[in-house]
Every structure is written in structure tokens, then in C-alpha cells.
Image (tube, rainbow, N blue to C red):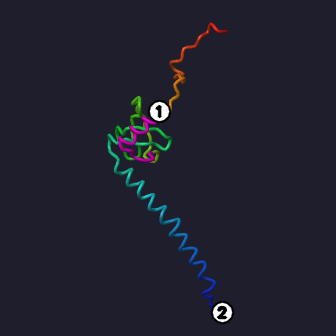
Amino acid sequence: MGLDLTMILPLILVLVSFYFFVIRPQNKQRKEVETMRSNMKPGDEILTIGGFYGIIYAIGNENVTIELLPDYHKALITKSAIAKVVNSADAEDLVEEDDQLEEPGVVDAEYEEIDETKE
């Protein structure tokens, strides 16, 4: 009454395929992100997980001080909030695309003049 190999073989195949298709790629991606975050240095341009572009100003053990683009306001964020390091050419291309997307009739709300005589 030993265990039949035909009953155990499908379970072993499922576990092996689960390892190669789920666990191994996930570990590889985690190592790449850890390497990227450990190799950051002041002056690198980054993209946060919130979608903000910035330049690294100072780096601590767990936190990073960044200057947010385009106004260069400083913000303290955790290293885990950094999605990727972008090179300056990528950031310039994205800024140019944003400039092209602006519609000609759109006015910045901060500078919009309100005509109160129409009431």
C-alpha cells in the first residue's frame, strides 16, 4: 500500500511550475529593484510611485530627500516610494510631451482673471 507515483507526479509538476513561473521571476524583480535603490546617488533623476519626478538631494538609510520638479521644492520620502531612476533624456522627453498636450484655451487656475462684471 505504498504511494502510487501517478498520484504524486501531478502535484510535483504543479509545484515545480509554480516555482518557475511565479516565485523565481518575483525574486528576480525584487533583487533588481533593491539593486536600483541601493545604487542611487544625489543628482539622479527619479520617478516616485505617486508619479512625481524629482532629483535626489540627500540619501539616508531608509529615507531620501528629493527636489520635486519643476519647482525644486524639497520632500522627504521613503526609499520604497521610488519606482525607478530615469535618465535626463527620458525626463526631458516627458516634459516636452506634456507641453505639447496643453490645449491653447486652457488657463492656469492660479493666474486666471475672473470678470465679476458679468453677474
Could you say which is closer to the camera, residue 20 or residue 39? 20
Above or below 6: residue 84: above
**Majority SS type along the magenta span:** helix
- Where, quadrant-wise, is the N terminus in this rendering? bottom right
Looking at the rendering, the stretch of residues picked out in magenta corresponds to: 82-98
Q: Residue at the far top: name it.
A: 117
Residue at mark 1? 100
The percent coordinates of residue 75 (x first, y second) are: 43, 35
Q: Name which quarter of the figure residue 117 lies in.
A: top right
Residue at 53% x, 17% y is 112
Q: Name which quarter of the figure residue 5 lies in.
A: bottom right
Above or below 12: residue 50: above
Q: Amino acid at mark 2?
A: Met
Above or below 3: residue 111: above
Mark 1, other Cα within 10 Å: few <14 / some 14–19 / many ≥20: few
- Circle 1 sits in a helix, a strand or a loop, which is it? helix
The percent coordinates of residue 111 (x first, y second) are: 50, 18
Determine the CA span between mark 2 and mark 1. Answer: 74 Å
Residue at mark 2? 1
Residue at 54% x, 22% y is 109
- Where, quadrant-wise, is the C terminus in this rendering? top right
First in sequence: mark 2 or mark 1?
A: 2
- Circle 2 sits in a helix, a strand or a loop, which is it? loop
Could you say which is closer to the camera, residue 112 or residue 55? 112
Let me know if residue 89 is in the magenta part: yes
Mark 2, other Cα within 10 Å: few <14 / some 14–19 / many ≥20: few
Residue at 44% x, 44% y is 78
